[in-house]
Every structure is written in C-alpha cells, then in structure tokens.
Image (spheres, helix red, strand yellow):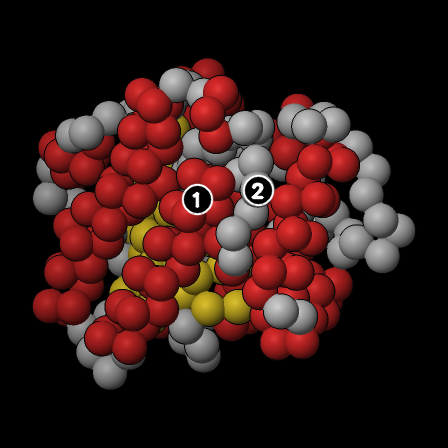
Amino acid sequence: MSLKQTYGSRALIAGASEGLGAAFARYLAAAGMDLVLIARRKEPLDQLAAELTSAYSVNVQNIICDLSDQDAASQISASLQGQEINMLVYNAALAYIGKFEDNDPEYYQKMAQANMVTPMNLLHLLGKPMLEKGRGACIMMASLAGFQGSGFLATYAASKAFDRILAESLWYEWKNRGVDVIACCAGATATPNYVNSNPGKTSPFAPKVQSPEAVVKECFSHLGKRPSFTSGRGNKIATFFMQNLLPRKMAINIMGDTARQMYGL
C-alpha cells in the first residue's frame, strides 16, 4: 500500500523550509499527501508551498512558528484548528559548534526547547489522536552525534540522544496500536545549515556526506519495520565500529577530535 493508504492523507513537517525538511515535504507531496509545513521563516516556506502545490496538486498549509518558543506546540495546535494529522515529521533542531562554556546559557535553553521539549509535546499532541484512530506515523530526526559524547557539540549531541531514545521507547509502546515511530540517525548531510557551518576536511576514511533526498528515501524504507536506523552505508559501518568494537572512551575521543579538526577548534 502507499503511504497515503497506510497512514492517511495529511502530514505535518516541523522544520520544513529547507534541507531535510524540504526533502521530506517533496517526498510526501509526491506520494499525494497534503502537508502542514512549519518553520520560523515565512519566505522560504511560502516558496516551497508554491512549488509543491504546482508540482503535485496537493494542499499545503504553512504555519510560521519558532519551535524554540515555550508554547510552540500550543501555537501549532491553535493553527491546526482540529485538523487530523496522520504523520508527524520532526526535523527542526538548533545546534552550536564550539566550546560549551563560550555560549550563552539562554541559547542552550532554546536548544533544549526546540530539540527536545517541543517534539515531545507534539508527539503527545498528535500521537494521541493517531492512537485513537489506530493508524499514523511519527518520524524523529536524530543524529550520529547522539550515540556517545561529542565534544564541541555537547548540548546538540545530548538532545539528539534524547530524541532517539524517546522515539525508540514510543516505537515499543505504540507498535501494536497502529502507529509507527522511528528515529532517523543521520550523519553529515548536505543541508544548507551543514554547508554554512563551513566544515573542513577530515580523514579520507570518514563517511561520505549524504544528500537529504537519500536520507529521506532510506527513512521510508525502514518506517514500520524498526525503531531506529543509521542512514548511509558509510555511517552504518562507522557506527558499528564506534559502538561495538571500540572502547567508549576512544569513541568519544574520535568524535571530539573530528569536530576539532573540521572546525579548527
């Protein structure tokens, strides 16, 4: 069956204006699903909505919302006005690369809100109606950084660990109730945010940077079959070595050393 037949006709994508969020939107629009797109910036969201409406003849609603706001989930709920949502894709995240002590604690509060609290609230808000209807899907974007301590990415890495564990836990709770949950653990992906971070070269053995479209396609190949997955062959091999063959101390050192080299820290 198609995604629309399996889960329903409307998907909500948080963090949809570019990169992975836009790739999810294009994939789901091509599958015939109507969309609710959420992002902080209006102009790129409007451009994407116009593109999808023209190309796929689907209905697209935009909600302008800062997902680091404490009441973000309430804002979204008010904008939906009771509309049924059959799939949640939470892609939005704030990140900081650098020494932990050099950043403002208020920014870490915003990171915690956008990366952990708002997705948790949206899972609760949208997951309950899915459970009542006995069908739906929730996709949480996690990260390889969340598998172990990641120096110079400390708060981001911790938040992505939270997202993966939350998704895996709900996969177990909801798997026999018609709602599929999965955490997509991506590595370096050629999104605008990644490119704009100006990463330097690392080891020639480092996994290749993936395209957003490749990550999204792989995500849907695993949805409904497993609680989480690591995207990309190179990332899978690297994760296996880091998590199963290397001492944890060495894995943490590798992550920190890689970030130091990439960003000249």
Report the amino acid beneath label 1: Asn
Question: Can I make out residue 21 in this image?
Answer: no
Report the amino acid beneath label 2: Gly
Q: Quadrant of the N terminus?
A: bottom left
| Foreground of the two, 57 or 251 | 251
Whether residue 125 is situated above or below residue 238 in the rendered picture: above
To which quarter of the image does residue 81 belong? top left
Residue in the picture at 79% in, 54% down: 206
Residue in the picture at 30% in, 29% down: 109
Please, what secondary structure does the residue beneath circle 1 have? loop
* Relative horizontal placement of residue 232, taking residue 193 as reference (left or right): right
What is the x, y in percent for residue 110? 32, 27
First-in-chain label (2 vs 1): 1
| Foreground of the two, 30 or 250 | 250
Residue in the picture at 81% in, 43% down: 202
| Foreground of the two, 58 or 49 | 49
Question: Can I make out residue 71 in this image?
Answer: yes
Whether residue 62 is situated above or below residue 3 in the rendered picture: above
Q: Which residue is mark 1?
A: 91
Q: Which residue is mark 2?
A: 151
Q: Residues within 10 Å of mark 1 (few under 14, many from 20)?
A: many
What is the x, y in percent for residue 85? 24, 52
To which quarter of the image does residue 106 belong? top left
What is the x, y in percent for residue 122? 22, 47
Question: Hey, which residue is sitting farthest bottom in the picture?
Answer: 176
* Relative horizontal placement of residue 216, taking residue 113 as reference (left or right): right
What is the x, y in percent for residue 156? 46, 40
Whether residue 168 is situated above or below residue 69 in the rendered picture: below
Residue in the picture at 49% in, 20% down: 102
